[in-house]
Image: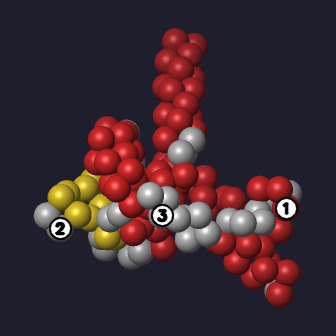
Amino acid sequence: MGRTHHENGKQIIENWNTVFNVLSSEPRRQLIVSLLDAEPDQSVPLPESAIMPNVPLDSEVLRLDLHHVHLPMLADSGFITWKTEPWIAFRGPKFDEVAVVFEALHAEASSIPDSLVIGCQRLEEEQQKSYNL
């Protein structure tokens, strides 16, 4: 039991490291939230679904970064699948491992410091909902 527990512990550390590494960039976070808002079997359009509404990015730079960095990283981790014709993304087989972070954040939006909320449209909306309850 000790060896299995140790090996499981190492795998969990690796899984969390992957989740937080993937979530370290805004276009990847925004794409995960867009997929979370979509029905489980529904695709989302790219690059639109990776753009934070309050901070638009240079569209050509975003397209290149999505194609060469962000989408491959998310797909290699199993969080999404994507295709180019049309350019869309779907939930991947491990999507729940990354989605749970946002579900927890959205559920606790009223407890998150304003320095991490103000300017983030989704968290502002979730925070407002919790205040209206």
Whether residue 48 sits left or right of residue 87 in the image: it is: right
Give the residue number, with chain letter if any, for mark 2.
Answer: 86
Give the distance between the C-alpha atoms of the residues marked 1 and 3, in whole angstroms. 21 Å
Q: CA distance from mark 2 to mark 3?
A: 18 Å
**Residue 51 badge:** 3
- Left or right: 89 in relation to 129: left
Residue shown at 78%/73% (left/top)?
A: 127
Amino acid identity at mark 1: Asp
Tell me which residue sits at (44%, 58%) in the image: 58
Q: Quadrant of the C terminus?
A: bottom right
| Quadrant placement of the N terminus | top right
Count residues near mark 3 (Cα–Cα under 10 Å), then give few for <14, some for 14-19, many for 20+: many
Please determine whether, in this image, residue 103 is positioned above or below residue 25: below
The 10 Å Cα crowd at callout 2, few under 14, some 14 to 19, many 20 or more, is few
Q: Please, which colouring scheme is shown?
A: secondary structure
Of tags 1 and 3, the one toward the viewer is 3
Name the image quarter holding residue 110. bottom right
Q: Amino acid at mark 3?
A: Ile
Q: Is residue 26 above or below residue 4?
A: below
